Amino acid sequence: MKTNTIMWNKNRITELLGIEYPILQGPFGGGLSTVELTTTVSNLGGLGGFGVYTLSPQEIYDVHRAIQSKTDKPYNLNLWVSDHDIIDEKHTKEQYQKAVETFQPYFDLLQTDIPLPPLSFESRFQNQLEVVLDIKPKVFSFMFGLLGENLIEDLHRQGTVVLGNATTLDEAIALEKTGVDVIVASGFESGGHRPSFLDSAEFSVTGTFALIQLIKDKVKIPVVAAGGIANGRGIAGAFKLGADAVQIGTAFLATEESGALPIHREFLFSEAAKSTTLTRAYTGRLGRGITTKITRDVLAATEKTLPFPLQTHFMGALRKAALEQQKNDLVFFWSGQIAPLLKHKKASALMRSLIEEASELLQ
């Protein structure tokens, strides 16, 4: 008897995004995304991603052109709606002094000077958004907030599919109301920043598999599972619970094509990756990375860290000196909880493995 089978990789999200496989590469910021990684994933049928929140408008144009020169497939351009947490100058000065007191011993150990605070910081989001409206990417995603309904309508009119990131059910509901096309459900297990925006990130820590089910029960648009997924088993589990696609970060970050430093990739494949920590001590926003000495020492002192991105500026000098002196225990390396299962060091091998394993389990 002949039966009709539904291909796991043919669903409403692959049709919406114009991709062959419902596998998205996490759009890393801070120099961790590369044209090579993004285009490798897109050319193999997934959706490559590029985080551009630290880039100038001209640099975003340049990245877009570079990607277009290597693929004609869709890719995801990612921005942060809220790109700073600075309240006022007086409050910031007081915070800076507290941070100096907390981190002075580490700067002394590395015999490097504590950096002076930057003169000012202004949001670049609106100027960056103008580029998105100009270049008209097939897929645009955003984090740390909501976009106005009129803006999302403008993006839709130009043919751009819009993805919003949620860490809680309430955030997913709020995103759906504004008209986004897809929800990326970012679970507690994820590496990197927690993109919470309705409540403190510390109170928005639902696990991926619980979050998928909560959102699917209340939201009608497609849901992408993000966090704790690095192989076909993770993909199959997410799909069984209702996800329409998965977004994979740490496994792609560990590949040679990413912008991660060699020592960062080495840590992702090491015993150290068994332990990760959520902390604000690295950038000022809550994020998950590999537990090192400095993470353990300052984890309880996060009230003395600076608002984002001043903490990033502050820690930049410490990180640079520690890397130069190979004192890697004084460096914080982004990583999700799934890192101990990583196997592949080439993005193409990882992508093919994800497809093969998922196909075997889901068909």
Image (cartoon, rainbow, N blue to C red):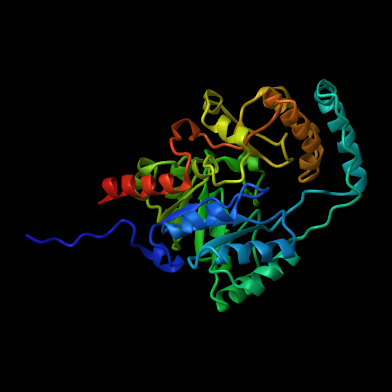
Can residue 170 be seen? Answer: no
Residue at 64%, 74% (x, y): give it. Answer: 150
Residue at 71%, 24% (x, y): give it. Answer: 327
Residue at 65%, 53% (x, y): give it. Answer: 144
Q: Residue 62: percent from the left, percent from the top?
A: 67, 64
State which quarter of the image contains the N terminus: bottom left
Closer-to-camera residue (272/145): 272
The single residue placed furthest to the front in the displayed view is 69
Q: Is residue 328 left or right of residue 208?
A: right
Say above or below: 75 vs 91. Answer: below
Can residue 182 be seen? Answer: yes
Q: Residue 352: percent from the left, percent from the top?
A: 38, 48
Q: Is residue 7 left or right of residue 209?
A: left
Residue 126, quarter of picture: bottom right
Q: Residue 324: percent from the left, percent from the top?
A: 74, 30
Closer-to-camera residue (326/81): 326
